[in-house]
Amino acid sequence: MFLPAGTQPDVLAKVEKMFLAASANPSTAAKLEALGLEVVARPGQEARHRIQKERAAWRPIVEATGFVAED
């Protein structure tokens, strides 16, 4: 789950807590999986670290293709 940049820390903490609780609920997880989604809930800092690691791994590959993102 992503929230807008600048979201207040207390709001982030509250949303993260609710998101993790919902993700841990077997009924919620089953509904999401029925939609073809894989439920992998991580605390914000852990998710951020994972994304940064993935971006670093893919950066040289993307740059080698010459791809440039457009807004």
Image: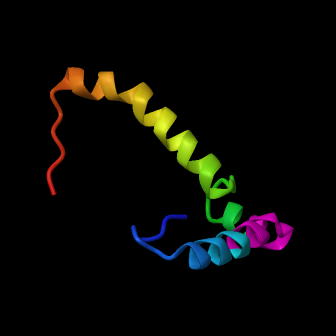
User: What residue is at 77 percent from the left and 66 percent from the top?
Assistant: 30
Residue 41 falls in image quadrant: bottom right
* Residue 37 or residue 42, whichever sits in front: 42
Residue 34 falls in image quadrant: bottom right
* Residue 54 or residue 6, whichever sits in front: 6
37 within the magenta span: no
Q: Residue furthest front?
A: 9
User: What residue is at 39 percent from the left and 67 percent from the top?
Assistant: 5
* Residue 55 or residue 9, whichever sits in front: 9
**In this picture, which residue range is highlighted in magenta?**
19-30
Q: For the C terminus, give its image quadrant.
A: bottom left
Q: For the N terminus, give its image quadrant.
A: bottom right
User: Which SS type dominates the magenta stretch?
Assistant: helix
Whole-percent x, y for residue 13 in the image? 65, 72
Residue 12 falls in image quadrant: bottom right
26 within the magenta span: yes
Question: Is 28 left, or right, of 51 in this rendering?
Answer: right
Whole-percent x, y for residue 22 in the image? 75, 73
User: What residue is at 68 percent from the left and 52 percent from the top?
Assistant: 40
Whole-percent x, y for residue 16 in the image? 66, 69
Q: Where 31 falls versus 46 (above or below)? A: below
Label total for image: 0
User: What residue is at 18 percent from the left and 45 percent from the top?
Assistant: 69
Whole-percent x, y for residue 68 in the image? 15, 39
Q: How is the image coloured?
A: rainbow
Question: Is 44 left, or right, of 59 in this rendering?
Answer: right
Question: Is 5 left, or right, of 68 in this rendering?
Answer: right
